[in-house]
């Protein structure tokens, strides 16, 4: 959704300069794209977090709570219905908005700058360098939201489905900082970059190669 949204925002805010999107247009496009896509896909995120937590909390030799993705989906739906599958949608959307705003706009901007400095627009080295930069910046932006999202999704709830530890995303941010300091929001930074960095490289490299392939036809 990023490219068409960027074109629309540039036309709306850029006027006669809509053919050359500003960094602000790219950031806004990334935010909107990330928010919409993450809201749609929140159930898969809940399943992923629950299955990861189940694996980490399982005692040696104990039978796992979930046998697979379908079973996890079924159990979560039985426990909380649609609302259960959309637990933590607020933190998820906030996190995705921040990540996509940084990831997509920084890749776009870094590639533009590299081309201005004489790099080949369709060169693999251009795409690789820009995607590594985007992955690093996106990890810095996403880590606090990842920490809070995981804590909100994994907290125990009462009979009404309300969290027993955190009442909201802001509450989780506040309590985490009070108890563990600001740097606690970047716990697991290296593993996060080890995941998000290659993700950016693969995603953007594939997109660029497909774009080059189809643009020649």
Image (spheres, helix red, strand yellow):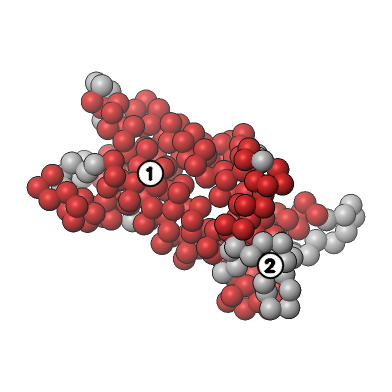
**What is the x, y in percent for residue 212?**
27, 39
Quarter of the figure that contains the N terminus: bottom left
**What is the x, y in percent for residue 194?**
58, 36
- What residue is rendered at 59% in x and 75% in y? 83
Residue 163's disc is 2
Residue 43's place in the image compared with 212, above or below, is: below
The answer to whether one can see residue 60 in this image is: yes
61 vs 148, nearest the viewer: 148
- What residue is rendered at 52% in x and 45% in y? 142
The answer to whether one can see residue 70 in this image is: no
Left or right of residue 18, residue 28 in this image: right
Left or right of residue 37, residue 63 in this image: right
203 vs 168, nearest the viewer: 168
Exactly how many numbered labels are in the figure? Answer: 2
Q: Based on the displayed image, in which of its 4 quarters is residue 164 positioned?
A: bottom right
131 vs 159, nearest the viewer: 159
Please identify, in this view, whether the residue under mark 1 or under mark 2 is nearer the observer: 2
Label 2: how many Cα within 10 Å (few below 14, some 14–19, many 20+): some
- What residue is rendered at 35% in x and 42% in y? 105
Residue denoted by label 1: 104
Specify the farthest residue to the front: 178
**Badge 1 vs badge 2, beta-carbon distance below 8 Å:** no
Q: Earlier in the sequence, mark 1 or mark 2?
A: 1
Residue 44's place in the image compared with 211, above or below, is: below
Label 1: how many Cα within 10 Å (few below 14, some 14–19, many 20+): many
């Amino acid at each position: 959704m990023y490219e068409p949204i960027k074109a629309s925002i540039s036309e709306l805010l850029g006027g006669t300069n809509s053919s050359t999107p500003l960094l602000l247009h790219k950031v806004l496009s990334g935010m909107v794209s990330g928010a919409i896509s993450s809201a749609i896909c929140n159930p898969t995120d809940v399943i992923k977090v629950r299955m990861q937590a189940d694996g980490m909390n399982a005692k040696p030799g104990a039978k796992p709570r979930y046998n697979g993705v379908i079973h996890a989906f079924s159990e979560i739906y039985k426990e909380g219905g649609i609302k259960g599958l959309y637990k933590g949608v607020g933190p998820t959307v906030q996190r995705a908005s921040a990540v996509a705003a940084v990831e997509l706009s920084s890749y776009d901007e870094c590639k533009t700058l590299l081309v201005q400095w004489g790099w080949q627009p369709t060169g693999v080295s251009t795409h690789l360098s820009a995607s590594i930069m985007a992955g690093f910046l996106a990890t810095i932006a996403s880590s606090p939201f990842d920490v809070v999202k995981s804590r909100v999704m994994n907290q125990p709830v009462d009979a009404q489905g309300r969290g027993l530890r955190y009442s909201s995303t802001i509450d989780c941010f506040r309590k985490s900082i009070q108890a563990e300091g600001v740097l606690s929001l970047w716990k697991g930074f290296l593993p996060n970059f080890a995941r998000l960095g290659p993700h950016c490289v693969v995603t953007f490299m594939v997109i660029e190669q497909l774009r080059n392939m189809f643009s020649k036809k």
